[in-house]
Amino acid sequence: MPDSFHMTPDDFRRHGHEVVEWVASYMERVGTLPIVPAVAPGDVRAALPDAAPEEPEPFAALLRDLDDVVLPGITHWQSPGWFAYFPANASGPSILAELAAAGLGAQGMLWATSPALTEVESQVLDWLVALLGLPASWTTADGPGGGVIQMSASDSTHVVHVVAREQAIARGAATDALVAYGSAQAHSSVERGARVAGFRHVRLVDVDDAFALRPGALRAAIEEDRANGLVPAIVTSAIGTTGTGAVDPVAEIVPIAREHGTWHHVDAAWAGAAMVCEEHRVHQAGVEHVDSYTFNPHKWLFTNFDCNVLWVADRAPLIATLSILPPYLRNAASESGAVIDYRDWHVPLGRRFRALKLWWVLRHYGASGLRHHVREHVALARELGRRIDAHPALERIAPVSFALVCLRHVDGDAATDALADAINATGTLHVTPSAVGDRRFVRISVGQTHTTGADVERLWAVVDAAAARG
Amino acid sequence: MPDSFHMTPDDFRRHGHEVVEWVASYMERVGTLPIVPAVAPGDVRAALPDAAPEEPEPFAALLRDLDDVVLPGITHWQSPGWFAYFPANASGPSILAELAAAGLGAQGMLWATSPALTEVESQVLDWLVALLGLPASWTTADGPGGGVIQMSASDSTHVVHVVAREQAIARGAATDALVAYGSAQAHSSVERGARVAGFRHVRLVDVDDAFALRPGALRAAIEEDRANGLVPAIVTSAIGTTGTGAVDPVAEIVPIAREHGTWHHVDAAWAGAAMVCEEHRVHQAGVEHVDSYTFNPHKWLFTNFDCNVLWVADRAPLIATLSILPPYLRNAASESGAVIDYRDWHVPLGRRFRALKLWWVLRHYGASGLRHHVREHVALARELGRRIDAHPALERIAPVSFALVCLRHVDGDAATDALADAINATGTLHVTPSAVGDRRFVRISVGQTHTTGADVERLWAVVDAAAARG
């Protein structure tokens, strides 16, 4: 038996160059690959042995299986023909920062366990506050608030429900009496976050014709719950719902939340990225009066998964809810109160250096580069919207929202599903068929890093042809 | 303004090679760097601009700041002189898999959103079931159970508390009556997971002289709570506590949990890795009767953070608790019931391809390579234990546990802290000073990937010299 099975730094160099080359080559060819793999459930597993190998395998075998086993089972989110769900748009600087962070292998649960992890994160999230036009009081440098990177918007939404629960309980409420609110079009993470946090009552409030929360319906729901002895604890407003990109009227929800003493959370998971462009900030009017705000750089800001940001207007209740300090984590820096220990800002304890990729993305693109590409995606979506409006067989079911277009065939659900099928049948274009109420529609989300006008033209050609057949 | 700010594949190649070289060079020199950086709170932030750059910066500037800004603020968890906390031991194949996964940029919330992500994960976690000597019924291939990768053991422990809560509530309990149990030496994630899940009552049960949970004390606590109208919902047993590596008697706790109808969770976050060696499995006797088990490949199995595994003996209640299916996530594969959708197994929705690094680590090392290195770390810890036992000025405060040694100076707390200070003053060795009850001790955790006998000799020389001065 050898003394060591570890990869030497020189082997790491060699294999590292091989993996870099593999990824670069993947970037070059991803647009030509069928976006949805032709595998049936169990196919990938069937290609793998039944047990871990007893003896080491050469690196070449690992790389070979990337092509032979993994790639045939990958849905290609990085294809420029990706118009499905919301994007998870990666970029070169982000991917390389993930490599550098993994190489450093530092763990930032406390400031003391790697100060640079914490301080780069705090600084970069403060930069983003300005970049998205959010309140300066949400920075850790200048305010009582602050931002933290979490894994997914679901985590952030869950954790604010926990904080809101604890605040209501501290005021004397029983857990089983608490109520959480969102719109009927809120992302499933709102209901899920509330239920995971132990809420027995979740109200999904009625929406208007543009699928935005109706403030009057919210007020009525809250008043009815209070009349029944329940305790409203948290309201979530969505800026850009996942279903149709609807924007809840945050400024009108603010006084309702305030009057009833609830936490007010904003879910801008996708659309938050658009706020780098001043012209979109009208959609977050009132945000200076909310308690928390989450958005995902890993959706539409060229930062590969995972990188979700949660800001709170006041970090004290978050930290009070999550802080428990065992003896082996005691240290002078934490006790001085002069540092941020991000372990107290989320459910996980350990954390890797995700701020590095956000930092590299912001510097590689610069604010002007981010604005350029977001504006390009929005312009493409609007052009698509104009064509749909001018087309006799097509109609939008909702306003074009940022870079999301939701359309249907005027002939109804079957013809609408046929549109989605025709697009997806190309192999190199992909959309999500969806439904609102009992009506089917096609969601077209523009935002993959390398999507250009040519890709939207390809998409339109298919839609136009399929619509004529409809 | 340029048409595109994106990094081209060719630039990715060039910069990718630069980052690979940077990481390889870091691996070569990390052992010579001071493990704890000489920065005061705010130093790193002060080196950063006040705002995001308006214009793009060249990649060379990003790389330069890795050296100039980041490295001076990094605590070097990858130094072979790292004996602090528990390790977060990375390895070449793991780091390169992180790169490949970031390059693929696929998102595995559903089987349908990238089948390979889900199936590689299911298969590799099934491999690990056999590799750690866990029950075959915990595999998704053969049993009602199954494993899932989460971010941190805190997440897994939290989520099982949520499931246990829901099971107790389904049997008629009120949330505010639920009780969670662990030992007084349980990791803070047990109390924290319970409190985040909404438990108002958490009992940290008395431990024996080896800091293991006393089953009699657990039984008494449960009976007292039941007599007071409370509802015991979950017990966590630790295999290898963070404080001192104590092993709770799982087999004796099993009948207590069963008698009182509670969920039984095992936290083997660190020591689970040791179970690749059959000789350690005596410490998990009884595990075939528990409901869930968590361990961190990112601690001591050469897989960089984050990579935590949660197994459940029965996946149905986990999925029932976490599953909410909105229309935009509906798909034929999910509806067929033939696939696993991991979004229903944890709080986050999105997920990256973390199974790739676990797969690459298992193949690069082979089971025999993993056993070799774990045994090497354990042997080094035991040798250290023998020297402490033979030293007149030193004593262990607990049995050597796997690869953790907890010692003190016989002269008391000041002399004990002086030992830790002497070790840490070297700059290239690092330990965690800690306390149990009101007694100070020094935690020496052997397990960094590249730690060898020579590093332990360096450590011992400092301890021996400092002990003489004590």
Image (cartoon, coloured by chain):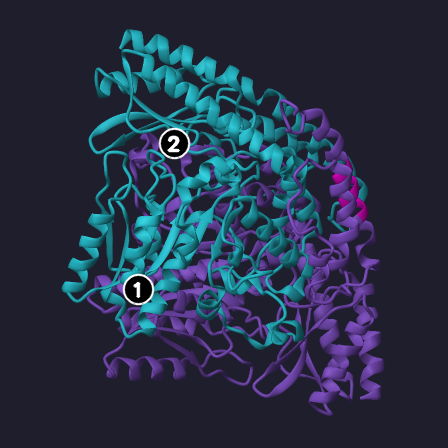
Chain colours: A purple, B cyan
Secondary structure of residue under mark 2: loop
Mark 2 lies on residue: B401
* A415 shown above or below A176: below
Where does residue A68 sit, x and y in percent of width and height?
A: 79, 51
| Position of residue B186 in the picture relative to residue B135 (left or right) | left
* Mark 2 surroundings within 10 Å by alpha-carbon count, few (fewer than 14), some (14 through 19), many (20 or more): many
The mark nearer the N terminus, 1 or 2, is 1
Q: Residue at x 78, y 85 (%)?
A: A391
Mark 1 lies on residue: B261
Residue A131 visible in image: yes
Which residues are drawn in magenta?
Answer: A18-25
* A214 shown above or below A71: below
Q: Residue at x 27, y 62 (%)?
A: B260
Q: Amino acid at mark 1?
A: Gly
Residue B246: quarter of image: top left
Frontmost residue, B101 versus B279: B279
* A422 shown above or below B69: below
Where does residue B396 sit, x and y in percent of width and height?
A: 30, 23
Q: Residue furthest bottom?
A: A411
Q: Amino acid at mark 2?
A: Ser
- In magenta stretch: residue A415: no
Where does residue A206 sit, x and y in percent of width and height?
A: 45, 83
Residue B3 visible in image: no
Q: Chain of mark 1?
A: B
Mark number, residue B283: none
Quadrant assignment for the C terminus of chain A = bottom right
Secondary structure of residue under mark 1: loop
Quadrant assignment for the N terminus of chain A = top right
By secondary structure, the bulk of the magenta-drawn segment is best described as: helix
- In magenta stretch: residue A19: yes
| Position of residue A418 in the picture relative to residue B53 (left or right) | right
- Image mark count: 2
